Amino acid sequence: MIKTLTLVFVLVVFAALVACSPNMKQYDDIVSKIKSFSIPENSTQRYRITDFGDIETLEAIADDVSFPRGQGAGTVWAHRTTNNLIVYIETKDQGHAGEFGYAYSENGERSGWPTEDFVRYWSIDKQVSENWWRVSYRLD
């Protein structure tokens, strides 16, 4: 009886951990698609994905395009340097409560963004894999 309860407990904990883990494949797909674009060195490109489950909804957007507070989820920034590709993906926008997402670094380094790009305000919260970090932007 104790072995059965222990096994059930372990399975419940494992299921909870798996359920809380992000589905990074959809974000890997975004990065793969961005890698196929010709992003000039030392420049930042903006994109928007309207359906994270459909990579074909990823499209370039102009720098001056803005979204109402709370509707920024799906915005993607890609910055190419000499030796790295950095991608920020906004996955959740809760308006004044904050914005959340993931950052990718091709070479695994936590490189900074150019100072003129507002993405510099994002905080790196936690590394989730070799090339991925959970990020947030919270108003102070």
Image (cartoon, rainbow, N blue to C red):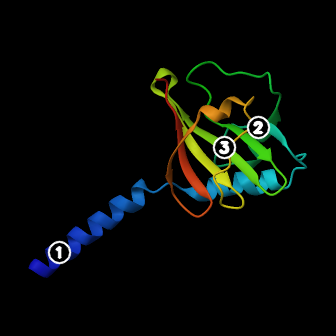
What residue is pinned by disc 1? 6
Q: Is residue 100 above or below residue 87?
A: above
Report the amino acid beneath label 1: Thr
Q: Is residue 97 above or below residue 42?
A: above
Mark sitting earlier along the chain (3/1) = 1
Mark sitting earlier along the chain (2/3) = 2
x and y, in percent, of residue 129 in the image: 55, 62
x and y, in percent, of residue 37 in the image: 87, 50
Q: Is residue 44 above or below residue 31?
A: above
Q: Is residue 97 above or below residue 102?
A: above
* Residue 80 left/right relative to 118: right
Q: Secondary structure at mark 2?
A: strand
* Residue 17 left/right relative to 115: left
Q: Residues within 10 Å of mark 3 (few under 14, many from 20)?
A: many
In which quadrant of the rendered view does residue 23 lie?
Answer: bottom right
What residue is pinned by disc 2? 47
* Residue 36 left/right relative to 76: right
x and y, in percent, of residue 28 in the image: 67, 57
Q: Secondary structure at mark 1?
A: helix
Report the amino acid beneath label 2: Tyr
Q: Residues within 10 Å of mark 2 (few under 14, many from 20)?
A: some
Report the amino acid beneath label 3: Tyr
What residue is pinned by disc 3? 88
In the foreground, 105 or 57: 105
